[in-house]
Amino acid sequence: MLGQDRLLGIARNVLLTVACAFTLFPIAWLALTSFKLPRDYFATPFQWMPSSLTIQHYFRLADLGGMAAVRNSLIVAAASALMTLLVAIPAAYAISKSRRGILRFAPTYVLALRALPPIILLIPLFLVYARLGLLDTYVGLVLAFSTFNVPFAIWMLVGFFDDFPHEVQEAAVLDGLSELGSLVRIIVPMIMPAVAVVGLFAFIAAWNELMLATTFTGQNTRTVTKLISSLLQSPTGADFGAAAGIGVISMVPGILLVALGQRFLVRGLTAGSIK
Amino acid sequence: MNAGAASLEGLRPSAKYLWGYSGPALLVTIVLVLFPLAYALWASFYAFSYSSDVPQWVGYNNYLRVLTDGDLRSSLASTAAIVLPALAIEVLLGLGLALAVNSVSRGRAILTTILALPVMISGGALGMTFRMLFTPQWGPVDNAVTRIFGVGSIDWLGNAALARMAVVLADVWQNTPFVMLICLAALAAIPEQIREASSVDGATSMQRFRFIEFPLIAKFLLVATLFRLIDLFRIFDVVFVMTGGGPASATETISYYIYRQGIRAFDVGYAVVLGVVLALVMLVVCIGLIRLVGRRGQ
């Protein structure tokens, strides 16, 4: 008995060690590559530690439109998160209060949209955008991102509103606040951490989005993900140093969310279907 | 705002919540989801081309093309060749890691954080990283393999089977933690007394897993599996950056094929029909998911 358990313990430690190494290696390697001179990252046999560190790739990245791409991604992701919250907070509140009429179908709709392949919206949106002149604009991109961000945020927020104690709101209304007033001045401030996390998820979903961003952006609004896909496909040969640099920049928000918001991760990843 | 609030209060409760509070969300849904879907449905009966502004009515032709489309069949096969191994590995490994992490006595939080790091990384950055990892000669994977096995350099992403394997590996790297996190949450919900009782009764850790933990987390594992299935089935970003669907069309998944038809070849009507095919397959999966989640609530 004891022997079996000890063997399991050893197997467990081996598994965890290998898994941690496997998880960390690509991130660490990419980050190191972005600071290596080409002669070091091209070296065979492979060298972990470079002979000298450099930030030349990041400077070159700026020349290749890296700054603009980061700025565009920040603008679009922040605007998308803000718009998502403004639309989703009242809707989630309403669904939590009243599951009548079409609102009854809201959960099914949200789950169905989770399963709907984004490509099926991409093509008609592309045609409409081309006609309305929304291609290569911030507005077009922010609106396109809201197709998946709004239902996601509603679904996450409904759970938080469901958990909110009714008595607190009733007290606020007795003190003379309107229902909307109690939502804006009492409920939302009290669930602010949850709202912030939902906003962060929406921000990262927009920051990470590739398919819509590649199709809808051009010279004016090129995002980080679009720059990633173009750097490796350049006709003059791939620029691996700069690509590693933009890859690292692209990973930062997602890694920060995991490191800081672990408590909300499961809820965010499954968008409320498991509580 | 006060005037708006006052008029909102005057409505019947159902109308107030539906048109007042949910109004903006309904507008977004109608304008950005339902209208494009309706437009797509209309477009599916027309043939588009770059040379003409006016789409041509073709009736059911786009739908009939599905039946004889060899590229569609090969993209479905490529999708399956990537989805099935990735799903199997992610579910088994995710469960195994959850059990392992759950059984350590100290450092559980930091272990979870390290293992979960890839889960929110963009598909673009993921594809780029793995494309570079698998570069012939200086890429670490090729470098290690040529040295350890003494073989010549291998063009990993230029070989159909190896390219699929590399895409699977990239997805496993990113999404195994998703399954792990859900299983960990389910394991954390098991009351401590149940575990204690079982060890008092002399159960080994194997028995405890088989008869206590597994039955209690099985439903969550199934939900995680279905979520992974849905997301894997429409996999696009990694493939787009990592292999561009190649070599030939070995990693051209169904989403990528639709993208190529609709955006690159501008065969919009047919791309929409393909989207419908994909959506129908997903719908079947999704109904299963909703049933499952719904049953859990009862």
Image (cartoon, rainbow, N blue to C red):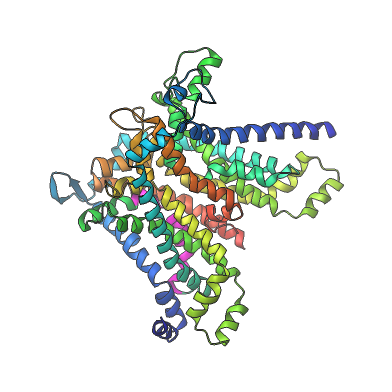
x, y percent for residue B235: 43, 42
Q: Is residue A230 visible?
A: yes
Residue for point 54% across, 59% down: A272
Residue for point 53% across, 59% down: A197
Residues shaded magenta: A101-120
Which of the pair B73/A98 is nearer the observer? Answer: A98
Residue for point 36% across, 64% down: B28
Quarter assignment of residue B274: top left
Q: Is residue A223 visible?
A: no
Is A245 a magenta residue?
Answer: no
Quadrant showing the N terminus of chain B: bottom left
Is B295 on the left-hand or right-hand side of A53?
right
Quadrant showing the C terminus of chain B: bottom right
x, y percent for residue B138: 45, 22
Residue for point 75% across, 55% down: B191
Which of the pair A114/B291 is nearer the observer? Answer: A114
x, y percent for residue B181: 61, 47
Is A212 on the left-hand or right-hand side of A184?
left
Is A4 on the left-hand or right-hand side of A238?
right
Quarter assignment of residue A187: bottom right
Q: Give the answer, above or below, for where A93 lies relative to B256.
A: below
